[in-house]
Amino acid sequence: MEVAVAVVSAVTKSVVSKLLRVIEKRYKELKDLEGDIGFLHRELAMICGSMEVQISHKGQPSAVEILSMDEFRALAHNIEDCLDRFLPCAACEGELQIRDPRKFCHEIARLKRDLDAAHERKVRYNAEFGSAAAESNLDENPVDPENPGAYGASPAVGIEEAKQELCKSLVDGGGGGGSGQASRRKLKVVSVVGFGGSGKTALAWEVYNCPQVAEQFSRRAWVTLASKHKHDVAAKEALLKAILEGLLGDEARESVPLKLRQLQQHVSLLLRTKRCLIVLDNIKMEIWDTIKPIFPNETESRILVTTTVNSVANACSLPDGYVHSMRSLSPEQSKDYLDKKVFVNGCSPDLDKGSTAIVNGCDGHPLALVSVAKALQGHKLTGDLCEKMIQNLCFRMDENENGHFTKLAQVLMNNYSSLPGNSLKTCLLYSSAFPNDRPVSRKTLTSRWLAEGYIDGDQEIANKKLDELIDRNIIRPVDPSNNGKAKTCEPHGIMHQFMLHKSMASNFIDTSFGAKNRSNFRHLIIDNRTNGTTGNMGHGTGPAGRGRDRQHNIFSSLKEKVDNLFSGSASKQLRPRSLTVFGSVEEAVPDLTSFELLRVLDLKECSVLSEEHLGQIYKLLHLKYLTLGCSVSNVSVEMERLHCLETLDLRKTKIETLPMEVITLPHLAHLYGKIKLKKISGKKLTGFLQGKTNLQTLAGVVVDSNSGFPEVMVHMKKLTKVKIWCEIPSTDSNYAVLSKAIHKFAQAGMATAVGARSLSLHLNDFSKGLLHHHQGDNTIAASRKHGYLSSLKLQGSLNQSPQFVMYLRGLKELCLTYTNLKGAELLAGLGNLKLLVCLKLVEVDLADLDINIGDFPSLQRLCLVVEKPRFPIIEHGALLRLVSLQLLCKDLVGLCDDIKVEWFEALEEVALDSMLNQQTIQLWENEVRKHPKRPRVILLKKVVDPTKTMSGKYVASRKVYNNCYTDTPQTRLQRSCQVTAPRVQSPAPRFLFDQVEVCSGPGPQMSKIQNLPH
């Protein structure tokens, strides 16, 4: 039921925020209803709070409690529907009036009665949320007493190389190039990071017990920390006591002090005088900050930590440590494991088909594969059985016969429940609405979060939410961008299945093609691309209710009746807030107007959209986010009826010209496509001159002789990002107007209250001098205004290095593509860019470019794309802050003589073209191993758009797994591998002390703080 709580919490925040705006702006109209609205406000908060109390207690809620929570969830949705139906745009100050105020009063009164009745039923049937608290005091993640380090054991594949890599890193001083005595005497922290269930703890346990490691470290201690670790003095004392007892072993019986200061001194002394190894399993940032000062800098001791959070791993390993990232199993490794554990007598074609289904369903997740393999053992195997097992994987986790899926369910739920705040949890749930085989763009996901009201804030806050999910390894980045942030992303396959299953059970998301129960779901995904029925969308959840017993079916029937009963008047209309269609919309949704309250309509993958359906879209007055597909070639001025529209994506359409009425929509902030805007005059132009347009992103617009954009661009006061294709000669009247508008856009300072700006400019052969046209009046005062353009992308020939770029003192990201400027010309224009962080150069070759000490002192990411394998000369000692080096040329052979990896001390990644021969890739792999930080090597594939004549773009190549080169920008070429189940050692005598379990006696010493495996 945690999913239901997150959903209701998101609804509550959205509704309460809307209520407050409505009451503030329409007080005169609503003063008679103020008491009732305040009642609804309080009730929503109480609904959410009561559910959170239920979830905070352990134990399975009863059927009555679940029904009661479902009832309150439905009522929360009814309140939201009521407000949307009668108050279509609460953000506007009076432009839209309340629809039928009298009916609105009656609806609020009805909702109040429904809430009172729900409370009475809750009391009558004793459905007190939290009553199950006493039913279970069991630890939800018990540790195997025989083997306390072996949670989440992974398949026995690829262990040796990963294990040897970590052992070498611990035993040696500073990595491949730092094995001298000086580096050995520095504290080094090695971090193992990855998604829950990927085998982090098991790998660390294997390294901990490795004879090579045991020989080098005379003192060893293992401590596992809980997810909800306290941070008071007593907890800190317990942690240090566990570490000290582990290091001392038998000597700890009488000599361990109890006071914090003494514990700190003893641990620090041991680390300085002995060579110690401490493993901190499941480390958290706040805990690391607490104990880090205790560890001396000058020591041969080593720390090994495991975590699910990238930022924690990086922080722990600073400045001279090493981060090892866990990766998914390859299909071959997964099949090999199944052959050894399940199909021991070989595979018939039928079983091979079933095996393939399991491999695809588990998506390389070790714990999922192990769980399925255990569940299959003892059964009479058939291909159908295997397919049904994986199709119903999430239902199997719910039923959990014989306990085979206990650990997997705990790990997946912990990934979800450990997220801070219900807003982030709801955002994760929403990400499962996208097909698992199709990575979603960062902009699409965050824009939809905002449109749905699941984030209370702007685009920057939405980006932070996504970055946090990526940082926690729950959502994985796919394609890289110039600034290091992923352009596209996707949840881990097994997590996607799990979240979709939970979302469907809570009426949050539905992927069913049939019309039954559509009205009860908030988000609907329909895929009829193949045979007119819903594909599995890569979800792998199987039909709802399949394989469940009679009692469960009766309960589901009751739950369905509750949903229908409390949908009230909303049942007359379909209630989804978002609709995503793949294939033909006519077959999927005969009448779009039945989705009265729709906020998000995603039809970019919709192959057929008739004029009738397009006309219906214009009647969806609540739409905030709209994307259209390739079957759309024009839109009507009727689109101006979409008053609430915030994002319009036309990139996949055939639309060339857009009515100016669309640009002037009061809430339209983001417009994507490649469109033309006709010249305007009269009242429409006056509207622009008065600064009424709300547009912040325009990516992009084609400017030709008939374009009206240059004239209105000057007056777009809120514009922060613009992409322009310039198709006009220098003799055209629009040429000078556009040049002036671009310079003014770049010069806009902080007084405009829009912050940093981004400009992308594609020039043709007739517009080479566009950026020079307006440079005659540049002065020192004017140049200072240029500092607020933070990103600039120029594509096309330039006749000289533009002074325009030289004056952009605040520029942080620069991309120059086929400018045909020589090295000296390029450097002359870029010398003043002291704040530049990201630089991308795309040319035929860059052999005449020299980068010397002092150039680009802030540069962190350098991307060089050339047709011929001639790269710049980078002086030893230059670019000291560089963390990413991309050398992209399919014809590169061997290493670059003038660019040495070892020169860049902060380097974290090297990117190469995926078309390079294997020998060259191996050379680079060997080269990065010599670097103290062991930068990852990533392979990028060039994709050429047939409609473009200049250059393609580099994206992640298709996924390759352990023991092979990978596709994602975060993946190491050093073959992060999975591990075998750790060896079982004889249990040692145990005693308890302040929530710390200590294993004493011979062999490695281990302690457990508050019992959290992962």
Image (tube, helix red, strand yellow):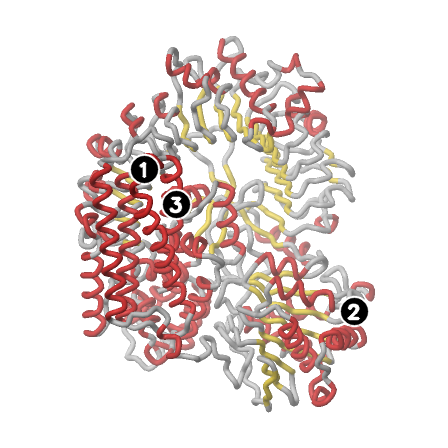
Quadrant in which residue 190 is drawn = bottom right
**Label 1 residue SS:** loop
* Residue kind at label 1, given as amino acid type: Leu
The disc, 1 or 3, on the residue closer to the chain's N-terminal end is 3
**Label 2 residue SS:** loop
Asked whether the residues under the numbered discs 2 and 1 touch, taking CB atoms below 8 Å apart as contact, a structural biologist would say no
The disc, 2 or 1, on the residue closer to the chain's N-terminal end is 2
Q: Where is residue 120 in the image (x, y as percent from the top left)?
A: 25, 64
* Residue kind at label 3, given as amino acid type: Gly
Q: In the rendered image, which residue does mark 2 sit on?
A: 299
Location of the N terminus by quadrant is bottom left
Decide: few, some or many residues near mark 1? Use Cα within 10 Å; few <14, some 14-19, many ≥20.
many
Quadrant in which residue 975 is drawn = bottom right
Q: Residue 623 carries which label?
A: 1
Along the horizontal axis of the image, is 518 left or right of 898?
left
Instruction: Please tell me whether residue 94 is drawn above or below residue 737 in the rendered image.
Output: below
Q: Residue 34 carries which label?
A: none
Query: What residue appears at the point 57 percent right and 65 percent down from the top-left corner?
Result: 307
Instruction: Please tell me whether residue 985 is drawn above or below residue 94 in the rendered image.
Output: below
Instruction: Please tell me whether residue 390 is drawn above or below residue 430 in the rendered image.
Output: below
Foreground: 71 or 940?
Answer: 71
